[in-house]
Image (spheres, helix red, strand yellow):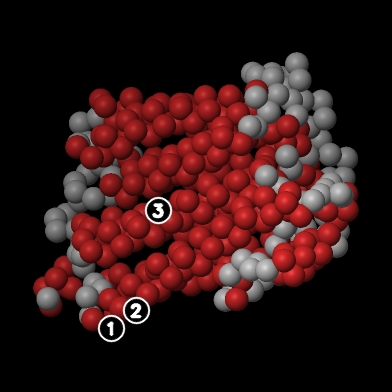
Amino acid sequence: MTSFLKDGRSQSVAIWLVGVTVVVFTMVVVGGATRLTGSGLSITEWKPVSGILPPLSAADWAKDFHLYQATPQYRQVNAGMSLGEFKSIFWWEWFHRLLGRLAGLAFALPFFTLLALRQMPMRLIWRCAILLALGGLQGLVGWWMVQSGLEHRILVAPERLVTHLGLALILFCALIWTAMEAWSGQPRARAARSGAWPAASMVFFAAVFFQCLLGALVAGNQAGLIDNDWPLMNGYLIPPDYVNKAGIWATLAHSQAAVQFDHRVVAYAVVIAAVGIAGSGLNSQVLMGQSRALALAVGVMAVFQALLGVATLMTRVPLPLALLHQAGAAILLALATALMWRVRRP
């Protein structure tokens, strides 16, 4: 047991972390559904513990519906909505929050159990403690985001949506990285020379992560509902309404044309880089085995994700395609994370 802990390797810890990663991935996809169905503001109170139970009586449903009717979204968008229609959006948000609670339990209970049994590798304890703190912070950020749409807006603030998704993706990637660390343990040999691959993989990961944040801005501004032609935007290479006269921040964060254009341009860069990584990986004398497979997977997934994005845009963001596109973004980010980890190991 002592050598096991010193080695820093635990397949059971790795499997547990992969399980939590799957829950977080599901949360990201369901979070996209709550946004696309306009469900995110249907629950107007934050009850971390008691909120696990949905309304159980007609009186409970009437109370929650009454609270929603006081929001700008109801008054300006959904006025006249029936109780049955309210329930259809309520369940999406409730399920999203339930997954958050389940993710917290799925992480915290095994973590403290492993600590009590002294079966957690020492080198992973502080990392897992940080992951637990990130999970708690994500719940707070989620409520902070929802609050932005309860008083003066019909949607949550796009920049808060970006923060919420960005933190979820940081947690998602950190779980993957830590799971790979747990599965492999400490490096047992000096890493072989891998040339520019560690730096290149890091830059590519950063580009994919940034592109995910731009996607959140597109979603937060409902920018996928305009300029639905491709490769031009309403017939223009650069949309004439790119600039918001209110200033730089209003343009970059709130202009529908700007956020969609930026998302397109970065997508092209990501695809070119991913195809370059795949080609270089197949011809590399340095990358072997898993690293080469991951490089190829990154290229294939990036091309598929770009084609999926174009299809989603040109069909005006139908729910199934939009959710598949969001899932594809998370999968590409996961592959970029795995590649970044793998090229640093012998």
Task: Please give the residue where the numbered disc 2 appears in the rendered image.
Answer: 112
Q: Label 3 amino acid?
A: Val
Place residue 14 in its image quadrant. bottom left
Check residue 22 in the rendering and tell me which mark sits there, or answer none. 3
Picture layout, residue 145 above or below residue 301:
below
Q: Is residue 87 above or below residue 309?
A: below
Residue 107 or 335: which is nearer the viewer? 107
Q: In the structure shown, which secondary structural element does the residue marked by tag 1 occupy? A: helix
Q: Nearer the viewer, residue 81 or 237?
A: 81
> Circle 1 sits on which residue?
116
Q: Quadrant of residue 281?
A: top left
What residue sits 33% from the left and 40% below the top? 196
**Which amino acid type is marked by label 1?**
Ala
Q: Earlier in the sequence, mark 2 or mark 3?
A: 3
Examine the image and state in which quarter residue 94 appears.
Answer: bottom right
Q: Earlier in the sequence, mark 1 or mark 3?
A: 3
